[in-house]
Amino acid sequence: MLSISFALVAILSFSAGSLAAPTPSLFAAPAGQEVTLMRRAQPARNDSELAAWAQAHRNGVMAKYGIQGNGTAASKRSEGENLIINQSKDSSYIGSLAVGTPPTSFEVILDTGSSDFWLASTSCDSSCSGSANFNPSSSSSFNNQNKQFEVTYGSGQAQGSLGQDVVQMAGFSVQNQIFGVVTQTSSNFLQAPVTGLIGLAWQSLASSGAMPLWQTLAAQGSWSEPVMAFQLTRFLNDTNAQQMEPGGSLTMGYTNSSLYTGDIDFQNLPDGQQTFWIQEVTSMTVQGNNLTQPSGSASYAAIDTGTTLVAGPPSAIQNLYAQIPGSAPGTGQWEGFYSYPCDTEVNVALSFGGPSWPVSPGDFQFASTSGNKCIGAFYEIPSNQGTPAWIVGDTFLKNVYSVFRFNPPSVGFAALSSAATSLNGVNGPVPTPTIGAVAAAVTALDMNSNAAPVSHSSSLLALVISAFVGCIVLY
């Protein structure tokens, strides 16, 4: 899922809370809370630095999704709110959680494109310096699984061993959650305040084999509704943006009706497959022209909060830029990307079988280089039969309210409300993680469990982990 080494330095990408969403009251509806997201601002880069980032980003996305350069597949690698941090001008989105007894809070990348949860430990070498790392010996409930753990994200990787402990997020607690305790990462893989990553896709993708925290909560009926939802802020073109900004919110167990208008259009995962959060790109409109898309798996897209931009099959991306006068394919480090005149306003919209969802021209304009040339946020990756043809990241997701539903397995989008869009580019205090009361607690399911949802009652007392952590991750 992630092209993390350079991308994280640039800091996503799931986010984990922003100023956008209201803080739930202590007596909110049962089993539902919100995670505040925070975003970190991106430092100015010259043309060569931008090109290096673009190359690392593209290579990382290909590696995250198991795509080799020749296009062949490699091995895979109640209610609550969590406020998000927006990091480095929409590069990644970060949320917060707490681990151990007594609980200690950490800020992690929110990634719907992967399924492993891991934290850098205090035993990590110098590659993890600068992060507030997890100390297993400080938790009386920690259990060492004595199993190796390794996960690769393109230009970066993390390795260590598997552990088991209590994990709290957005007012929910999972006992005996298995996660990676990382002792080594690629150089510059993590950048403070980020301590790790939480995967929010399905268990079948987990390198550890463990059921993701969100899936455990949903499968055991801990949520009032079997959904988690994101609202992400935009600071991409804000010259006054700081390294960290309010990033939006992640809610678990409910949708925040103040952040969207109209209906949420749900489309089921194709064939009910529970791997990535897959949707089929059924149509694409560019500059008013409708571009025909192939049907079926040739147009499958992974909806990925852990990826900054949008990657697609070469034929579709070439056709997209053919609608933009003056566009040209990049070379060298810009391979796979396209440039176009900066004074051209590009209007792109995607449909996944329902309404057509427009992408802001400002989001499409990923970067500007010398000579009045801008770089588009849609780029090419080789096609193969083992992974989705499209990787739809934050360039698109900032423009919609996105909902990920456990049962039936589906993804929904809705139009953002004026209250949500008014938060774009609004500088504010970055949320800090706090530890509160637990509204619902469950025990992690066995790694091989496929348990169906069960009835679960919980206290009305809602915990708000107010973590304004919205990292921008470039994958």
Image (spheres, grey):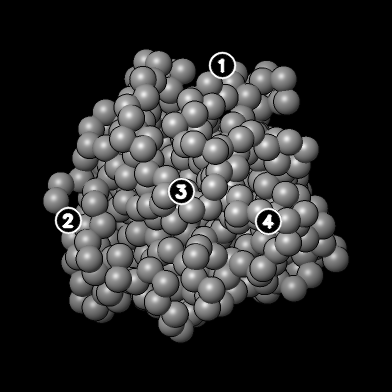
Asked if marks 2 and 4 touch (Cβ < 8 Å), the reply is no
Would you say 298 lies left or right of 8 here? left
Q: Circle 3 sits on which residue?
A: 344
Q: Position of residue 78 (x, y in %)?
A: 26, 59
As measured in the structure, the alpha-carbon distance from the residue carrying label 4 to the one carrying label 1 is 38 Å
**Of tags 1 and 3, which is closer to the observer?**
3
Labels 1 and 2: the sequence-earlier one: 2
The disc label shown at residue 385, or none:
1
Would you say 152 lies left or right of 212 here? right
Q: Nearer the viewer, residue 412 or 54?
A: 54
As measured in the structure, the alpha-carbon distance from the residue carrying label 2 to the one carrying label 4 is 40 Å
Dot 1: few (<14), some (14–19), or many (≥20) neighbours within 10 Å?
few
Tag 1: residue type? Gln
Q: Position of residue 62 (x, y in %)?
A: 65, 34
Q: Circle 4 sits on which residue?
A: 370
Q: Residue at x 32, y 45 (%)?
A: 358
Q: Nearer the viewer, residue 144 or 173?
A: 173
Asked if residue 134 can be seen in this view, the reply is no
Labels 2 and 3: the sequence-earlier one: 2
Find the residue positioned furthest to the bottom: 429
**Of tags 2 and 3, which is closer to the observer?**
3
Labels 2 and 4: the sequence-earlier one: 2
342 lies above or below 248: above
Asked if marks 2 and 3 touch (Cβ < 8 Å), the reply is no
Tag 2: residue type? Thr
Q: Residue at x 57, y 70 (%)?
A: 41
Tag 4: residue type? Ser
Q: Circle 2 sits on which residue?
A: 261
Tag 3: residue type? Thr
Would you say 453 lies left or right of 392 here? left
Find the residue positioned furthest to the left: 262
